[in-house]
Image (spheres, grey):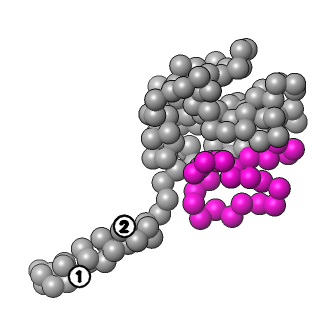
Amino acid sequence: MVPLWVRAGALICTAALVLTGCAPDDSISQIRSFLAADSGPDDLLPPGVKDATSDPESSRFVGEKAGVSYFLTKHVDPASGSPGYCLVISNPTEGAASSCASDVNATHLWVSSSETGSARVVVADDVIPDGWTKLGDFLIVNPEK
């Protein structure tokens, strides 16, 4: 049997980690919260920009860099029925690109195209490579790569 003082100490240490922000970042929770927010006029995907498996009604505008717009949408994997997310990039003069991942793999979501550049989901302690910019809490972008 574990003494009460050991259990109390473990509880205090765990609470201290959570309260000081030392707990690991959770990009999936951040994405869920972001998509759950009320939508506005900027959240609409540009005309003709969509992914066949995404829900365009769930689209949320993440931000813009060098004329390229970044969006997230909800997604359902057609093979498994598992929920997830799509990252959609739109460059009005060059085209669009998207990539989707299941909820479990959303922290590895990445999209890249010669017309739109690149974007990927990151966690707080990820190193941001040279030439990339962080948009919001969970996305880094590079319109030129």
Visible in this render: residue 142?
A: yes
Classify the position of the C terminus by image quarter: top right
Residue placed under numbered mark 2 in the picture: 18
| Image coordinates for residue 44, horizontal then vertical, percent | 62, 22
Say whether residue 132 is left or right of residue 93. left
Quarter where residue 22 is shown: bottom left
Residue placed under numbered mark 1 in the picture: 9
What residue is at 67 percent from the left and 39 percent from the top? Answer: 63
Which residue occupies the foreground of this view, 111 or 90? 90
Q: In this view, does 140 lie above or below 127?
A: above
Which residue occupies the foreground of this view, 133 or 56? 133
Type of amino acid under label 1: Gly
Q: Give the range drawn in magenta.
A: 121-145
Q: Which of marks 2 and 1 is nearer the N terminus?
A: 1
| Image coordinates for residue 4, horizontal then vertical, percent | 12, 81
| Image coordinates for residue 118, horizontal then vertical, percent | 78, 42
Q: How many circles with numbers are drawn on the protein? A: 2
Magenta stretch contains residue 47: no
Mark 2 and mark 1 residues within 8 Å of each other at the beta carbon: no
Secondary structure under tag 1 reads: helix
Magenta stretch contains residue 132: yes
Quarter where residue 18 is shown: bottom left
Which residue occupies the foreground of this view, 48 or 112? 48
What residue is at 74 percent from the left and 46 percent from the top? Answer: 141
Label the magenta part by its dominant secondary structure: loop
What residue is at 61 percent from the left and 48 percent from the top? Answer: 136
Q: Is residue 101 above or below residue 121?
A: above
| Image coordinates for residue 139, horizontal then vertical, percent | 64, 47
Q: Is residue 57 above or below residue 136?
A: above
Quarter where residue 129 is shown: bottom right
Query: Dot 1, how many residues are within 10 Å of its Cα: few (below 14), some (14-19), or many (20+)?
Result: few
Q: Is residue 129 above or below residue 31?
A: below
